[in-house]
Image: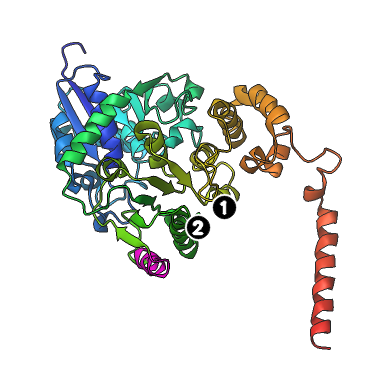
Amino acid sequence: MLNRPRTQIFMASTLYGAATLAAALDADRFAPADRRLLLLSNNAATPETTASLDTMPGFDRLRTRFDRVLSWNETISPFHPGGWSPRADDAPLWERYLRLLWGLGDSHVELIVESIQVNPALALAQVFPGAPLDVYADGLMSYGPTRNKLDPLIGTRIGRLLHLDLVPGLTPLLLTEFEVPTETVPTDAFLKVLDELSDTTPELDVPHGAALLLGQYLSALGILTPEEEEGLHVQMLRGAAERGHQEIVFKPHPSAPARWSRLLEREAEKLDLTLTVLDTPVLAEVLYQRMRPALVVGCFSTALLTASAFYDLPTARTGTGLLLERLSPYQNSNRIPVTIVDALVPDLADRSATPNTAPGDIAGLVTAVGYAMQHQIYPNLRPATERYLATRLDQHTWRYFKRRRLTALALPGAIPSQLAFIPRNATVRKVARRARAVQRRLKKRAAFG
């Protein structure tokens, strides 16, 4: 093995993720290799109609760190990256095929992937069953639990978790069930990469010092309806206006429909605001450098944390309360990002700019929410969770938990034991249904005289 050439395959699906990898390489976070390949995966619902990562402004500067750029979509076509994985019996055939297709020969392969618990990263790990794994995180989900139980044949191959220091002092929970050590990608290296992207991005006609609104495409995830998400963007616009901002820049999600921007434009006209809708697909961090916004507003975008932690920009969030109620099931992997943003980023409607949770308390909150989400994977977190719930549940922290969930796990804050039988008692439910039916009949009789 010592005489075999070493090939490192880096998988990326977003420009932010590719920038994270570039920063880690610049900071010498990877051992030397004979070849470094960048494997791009377009995970959009309809990849054929969505811009590929290698066509985005600034990508040419990132690709200089790699010897070759490959496409996972082309490799497994016509299958979708999010829905395909090799059958167990076919994995050796796929490895032989990819070694031939990508010119790997008998080289020693190392994989560096994101979101290892789902495809396409999981599929790539299955194709190369002997390859050691590194996982990198480009967002807030790394602070939460692994979203589902990972096969030990995969989990035990993971050497480390690389992540950005988005929440200083907070250690990621992801993959700790396999005792995977965490390693921080230096912030200064990441900012230098973002400077490169900013230098190569075409000129942007955006006003300096305006308020910046970050759009997300939550309706595509089934979290909000399209109408609710449109309303959320309008709420951002109104909130910025109420804070005295007359110039607004809206950065829509690349996959969001154009009609959302038109609704905002009509609302801006009513409020006599100057609205700029950004059509160029650039990172929010490039805008931070180009326009130095007076305020960054979003829902639970990771960019809210990069704005405050890396650029010292004022931030505000809106809509997180609705999402904390709406996310279902409780184990939804977006819960930790929403919780962190809701806890640490001030509410747009709150003029005092005060977060719900002190930065020093965030670790206890994330531990408790993480255990409630995936208690079977992290049984060792129960004592810390019980201590947090017994001492910290109040009008602010209750929003992060569901009483039914706490009851199911027999945690502090649960429904009293003498009443816990009611939701599951068939006789009580039957009586309640009959009572509601009688009520409806009485209302109908009253309505028709």
Whether residue 57 appears in this view of the structure is yes
Quarter of the figure with the N terminus: top left
Query: Element at badge 2?
Result: loop
| Label 1 crowd (10 A; few <14 / some 14-19 / many >=20) | few
| Left or right: residue 180 compared with residue 75 | right
Q: Is residue 215 above or below residue 30?
A: below
Question: Magenta stretch containing residue 268, yes or no?
Answer: yes
Q: Which residues are magenta?
A: 260-272
Q: Main secondary structure of the magenta part?
A: helix
Question: Magenta stretch containing residue 104, yes or no?
Answer: no
Q: Is residue 19 above or below residue 437?
A: above
Q: Are marks 2 and 1 in contact (CB under 8 Å)?
A: yes
Quarter of the figure with the C terminus: bottom right
Front position among marks 2 and 1: 1
The amino acid marked with disc number 1 is Leu
The amino acid marked with disc number 2 is Leu
Instruction: From the image, tell me which residue sits under label 1.
Output: 322
Q: Quadrant of residue 259?
A: bottom left
Residue 302 is tagged as: none
Query: Element at badge 1?
Result: helix
Residue 224 is tagged as: 2
